[in-house]
Image (cartoon, helix red, strand yellow):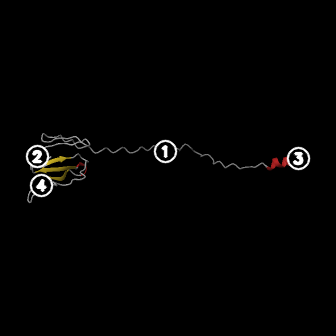
Amino acid sequence: MRCWSLISILLVLGCEHATELPAVPPPPEDLSQWTVPELVQPPAPMPHAPKPPEDKPTAAEKVAPFAPGTTVTVSVPVGWPLDIVLEQGEQVRNIVGGDRAPLDAGQPPRWEIKEGADGHGETQRPHVFLTVSEPGLT
């Protein structure tokens, strides 16, 4: 019995592990000078550039609103260019120029198409000029 009590005491004493706790830093001495960080506000948004005033169409101008897939019919005076003015930011991508019908020698094309623009930079607007030399073309 003595043997069992000696073994149990050794087991209990041998299982004890002493772990050291990490050292706690000392508290700051004076907190009276401590301040809250300053709140930084984001910069104010930049105002947008003013829009140019909208052009009011004159009596000689016809304004056709854009609608995808629609066709606009206009009358073009013979010998005078029709000026098609696009909105700012719109682009002319492909213009295959002029009349493709075979012509006799020295005969002017039945119709002609050219590109142009007015304004500069953000105010630039593209133009398409269409001129016909024969009446009744469609």
According to the picture, the residue beneath numbered tag 3 turns out to be 4
* Label whose residue precedes the other's in the sequence (1 or 4): 1
Residue type at mark 1: give it: Pro
Mark 3 touches mark 2? (CB < 8 Å): no
Estimate the x, y position of residue 59 in percent, counting from the top left: 12, 39
Mark 4 touches mark 3? (CB < 8 Å): no
- Point out which mark residue 109 bears: 4
Label 1 environment density (alpha carbons within 10 Å; few <14, some 14–19, many ≥20): few
Apparent side of residue 101 relative to residue 51 in the rendered image (left or right): left
* Label whose residue precedes the other's in the sequence (3 or 2): 3
Residue type at mark 3: give it: Trp
Label 4 environment density (alpha carbons within 10 Å; few <14, some 14–19, many ≥20): some
Residue type at mark 4: give it: Pro
* Label whose residue precedes the other's in the sequence (2 or 4): 4
* Label whose residue precedes the other's in the sequence (1 or 2): 1
Up the image or down, 58 lies above or below 119; here it is above
Q: What element carries label 4?
A: loop
- Point out which mark residue 74 bears: none
* Label whose residue precedes the other's in the sequence (4 or 3): 3
According to the picture, the residue beneath numbered tag 2 turns out to be 136
Apparent side of residue 38 relative to residue 94 in the rendered image (left or right): right
According to the picture, the residue beneath numbered tag 1 turns out to be 37
Label 2 environment density (alpha carbons within 10 Å; few <14, some 14–19, many ≥20): few
Q: How far apart are marks 3 and 1 (CA)?
A: 66 Å
Mark 3 touches mark 1? (CB < 8 Å): no
